[in-house]
Image: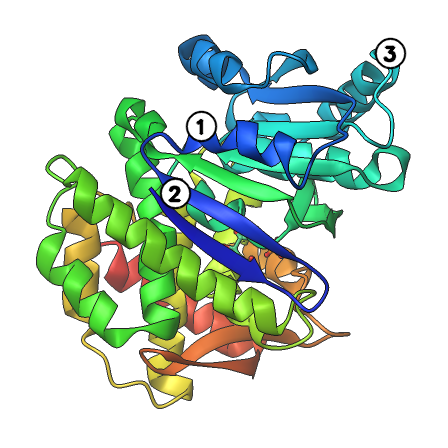
Amino acid sequence: MRELTIETPDQSYPVYVGEGALSKLTELFAGPLKGTTKLLVIADELVASLHSEALQQALPPQLSCEWLTVPNGEAAKTFSSFENCLTFALEKGLDRKSCILAFGGGATGDLAGYVAASYMRGISFIQIPTTILAHDSAVGGKTAINHPLGKNMIGHFHQPAAVVFDTRFLQTLPEQQVRSGFAEVIKHALIADPAFLAELKANVKSFKDLSADFLAYCLEKGIQIKGEIVGKDVKEQGVRAYLNFGHTYGHALEAKLGYGRITHGEAVAAGMVFALHVSERKAGLSFDLKEFIVWLKGLGYPLDLNNGLPFEELYTLMARDKKTIGETIRFVLLQEVGRPVMKEMSRQELEEADRFMREEAAV
Ligand SMILES: O=C(O)C(=O)C[C@@H](O)[C@H](O)[C@H](O)COP(=O)(O)O
């Protein structure tokens, strides 16, 4: 197991990653979270059905603990789920010294984190991720629910007290979830580390034979890259937006197709191809996009997600992206692998890239 530290100007917290990381919970409640009155586990229903016993055994027996299950995946990130969690917390008498444990993938973490950020104006929470995707979402304190008009539109920045990432949980992940999570690993390589990207391309030809050691290495790399960026810009006033590479188009696809109809990572993979194409035309990127597309397709990423979707509707969704300022849609592009840049986008440029996705990337 490895311990990484996320350092922000106001706060630092540990990320425990590896087999057996759950054992760190006892230390946390005897140390930095000593004095916690009550625990509330907000758990993905599927994860709870598979792994609740493992978590139960790792929790300090002296602490009273309530469990609430929420729908699997993005279906949890709704106003009604959010309200249910708050009602449950009030009914069970959580106070300001209580702590929420987010047990599941990125969506559970986003919801539970937002509940922790809002309950009594903010209580502690611990992220206990169970997916590869969550190596990204559990770190950095972005919490949110979705709105029908846009993804992650309602939320707070609220840092967890710790991230306890026990990689034993990854053994039960279906391949589609591995694929989804790996898109964020690829994103971290693209925005920050050309050598890491080369390693990924050389070593990952299929998700079926990914070794546990290589996966752990990728997760650590991703967390390190993310942690460094978050440390410089917690509330996304500048460089943190680079972590949004591939997300403007990706989020528009997710919102249009219906949250949870495609995985977040598959949408981000398509969004990255879109952004790389624009980067070649507008940011001077020199990159073998054809080869990259072949690699992604070989890994099973569907790149035809905009099939049948009118550009106009995707455009409206992209215009509502959180990076948009006034009327100006802004995209994260790459000048080089590892050298991101923010650029203003015209409607014409976006339409051309959407056409590229339809007519070239998808075929
Ligand atoms: O941590 C960040 O900052 C990111 O943008 C990471 C993204 O991979 C992640 O999906 C995030 O939740 C998206 O944030 P949003 O602000 O675009 O909703």
Camera-nearest residue between 246 and 37: 37
Labels 2 and 3: the sequence-earlier one: 2
10 Å crowding of disc 2: few (<14), some (14-19), many (20+): many
Q: Nearer the viewer, mark 2 or mark 1?
A: 1
Across and down, in percent, residue 14 comes to 53, 49
User: Looking at the picture, which amino acid does disc 3 mark?
Assistant: Glu
Q: Is residue 54 left or right of residue 97?
A: left
Under circle 1, the secondary element is helix
10 Å crowding of disc 3: few (<14), some (14-19), many (20+): few
The residue where tag 1 is placed is: 23
Labels 2 and 1: the sequence-earlier one: 2
Q: Nearer the viewer, mark 3 or mark 1?
A: 1
The CA span between labels 3 and 1 is 29 Å
In the rendered view, tell whether residue 77 sits above or below residue 247: above
In the rendered view, tell whether residue 247 sits above or below residue 29: below
The disc placed on residue 91 is: 3
The residue where tag 2 is placed is: 17
Under circle 2, the secondary element is strand
Across and down, in percent, residue 170 comes to 32, 30
The CA span between labels 2 and 3 is 33 Å
The quadrant of the image that shows the C terminus is: bottom left
The residue at 25%/63% (across/down) is: 360
Labels 3 and 1: the sequence-earlier one: 1
User: Looking at the picture, which amino acid does disc 2 mark?
Assistant: Val
For residue 232, say whether it is visible.
yes
The residue at 50%/57% (across/down) is: 5
User: Looking at the picture, which amino acid does disc 1 mark?
Assistant: Ser
In the rendered view, tell whether residue 13 sits above or below residue 101: below
Q: Nearer the viewer, mark 2 or mark 3?
A: 2
Numbered disc total: 3
The quadrant of the image that shows the N terminus is: top left
Quadrant of residue 131 within the rendered picture = top left
